[in-house]
Image (cartoon, helix red, strand yellow):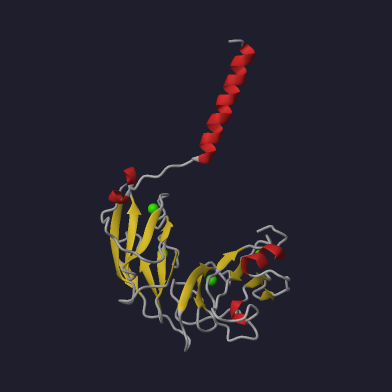
């Protein structure tokens, strides 16, 4: 075989190898046996994140939808399943979010059930977990989704709760990792509707100006496409404590499609 033929064959093999790799870049193996309880039943939201700040991802999950566990990763891919106790209800949670509310280096968990929300705080050793009382709430309250973000930029993460049946609710962190009152820093209610239909939230710097903006997807079945309960909302942080609703019409665009159009496909 000539050198030219050898090079051609090698190139073909490289392309063939790359093609096979592109078609099947990953493979997965069921590793449930690594958990101390392979029969764990979560059935709803969970979070995969480094809960204790040791550089290894952990899992926060709700057995039967209400018993909170910190499943902490140890070395050699082993896990320690730590019970944090009941998260406030015997029902099943609809919403859950993880964040370090008291800045002690360990992430805490907010949980939303059908009519109440709670906060579970952990000590640094993950030996003591403290459940709050039900957070204050408006007359109509169904937490569909939750998110943490430092909305007022004071160094403590605030809590945003998507309310399915009324305007959403914000809770200002009081500086010690608690949420004693509803603190609506600004209104996220759609004008021309009852402000309900809030189904999700994303806090991110949409316009790259250094501050966090908010996008709220909406959903309400059996309503017209232009019903306020179905119109997604993009709130732009003005950087001075005020926020502005970006409601510029985008013909033919709805939901995330509207967001994409608004940003010239930069999202
Ligand atoms: Ca960890
Ligand atoms: Ca904490
Ligand atoms: Ca804050
Ligand atoms: Ca911004």
Residue 189 in sight from this viewpoint: no
Q: Residue at x 33, y 57 (%)?
A: 71
Q: Residue at x 39, y 66 (%)?
A: 44
Q: Residue most toward the bottom? A: 139
Decide which of 207, 253 is in the foreground and name it. 253
**Residue 201 falls in image quadrant:** bottom right
Q: Residue at x 40, y 49 (%)?
A: 56
Q: How many numbered discs sit on the rendered protein?
A: 0
Q: Percent x, y for residue 164?
A: 50, 79
Q: Is 217 on the left-hand or right-hand side of 67? A: right
**Residue 248 falls in image quadrant:** bottom right
Q: Percent x, y for residue 250?
A: 72, 70
Q: Percent x, y for residue 153?
A: 58, 69
Above or below — where is 98 with respect to 75?
below
Residue 24 in sight from this viewpoint: yes
Q: Is 250 on the left-hand or right-hand side of 26? A: right
Above or below — where is 197 with respect to 85?
below
**Residue 223 falls in image quadrant:** bottom right
In which quadrant of the rendered image does the C terminus lie?
bottom right
Q: Residue most toward the top? A: 2
Decide which of 58, 123 is in the foreground and name it. 58
In which quadrant of the rendered image does the N terminus lie?
top right
Q: Percent x, y for residue 239?
A: 67, 69
Q: Is 31 on the left-hand or right-hand side of 187? A: left
């Amino acid at each position: 075989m000539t050198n030219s033929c050898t090079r051609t064959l090698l190139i073909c093999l490289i392309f063939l190898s790359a093609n096979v790799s592109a078609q099947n870049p990953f493979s997965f193996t069921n590793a449930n046996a690594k958990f101390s309880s392979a029969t764990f039943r979560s059935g709803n939201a969970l979070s995969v994140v480094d809960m204790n700040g040791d550089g290894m991802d952990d899992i926060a999950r709700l057995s039967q939808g209400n018993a909170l566990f910190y499943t902490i990763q140890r070395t050699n891919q082993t896990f320690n399943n730590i019970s944090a106790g009941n998260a406030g209800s015997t029902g099943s949670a609809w919403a859950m979010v993880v964040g370090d509310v008291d800045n002690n280096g360990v992430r805490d968990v907010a949980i939303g059930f059908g009519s109440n929300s709670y906060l579970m705080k952990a000590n640094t050793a993950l030996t003591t977990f403290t459940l709050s009382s039900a957070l204050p709430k408006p007359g109509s309250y169904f937490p569909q989704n939750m998110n943490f973000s430092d909305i007022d930029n004071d160094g403590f993460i605030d809590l945003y709760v998507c309310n399915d049946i009324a305007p959403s609710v914000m809770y200002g962190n009081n500086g010690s990792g608690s949420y004693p009152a509803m603190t609506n820093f600004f209104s996220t209610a759609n004008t021309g509707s009852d402000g309900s239909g809030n189904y999700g939230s994303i806090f991110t710097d949409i316009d790259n100006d250094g501050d966090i903006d908010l996008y709220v997807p909406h959903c309400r079945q059996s309503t017209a496409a232009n019903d306020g309960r179905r119109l997604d909302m993009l709130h732009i942080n003005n950087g001075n404590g005020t926020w502005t609703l970006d409601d510029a019409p985008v013909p033919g665009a709805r939901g995330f499609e509207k967001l994409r159009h608004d940003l010239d496909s930069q999202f």
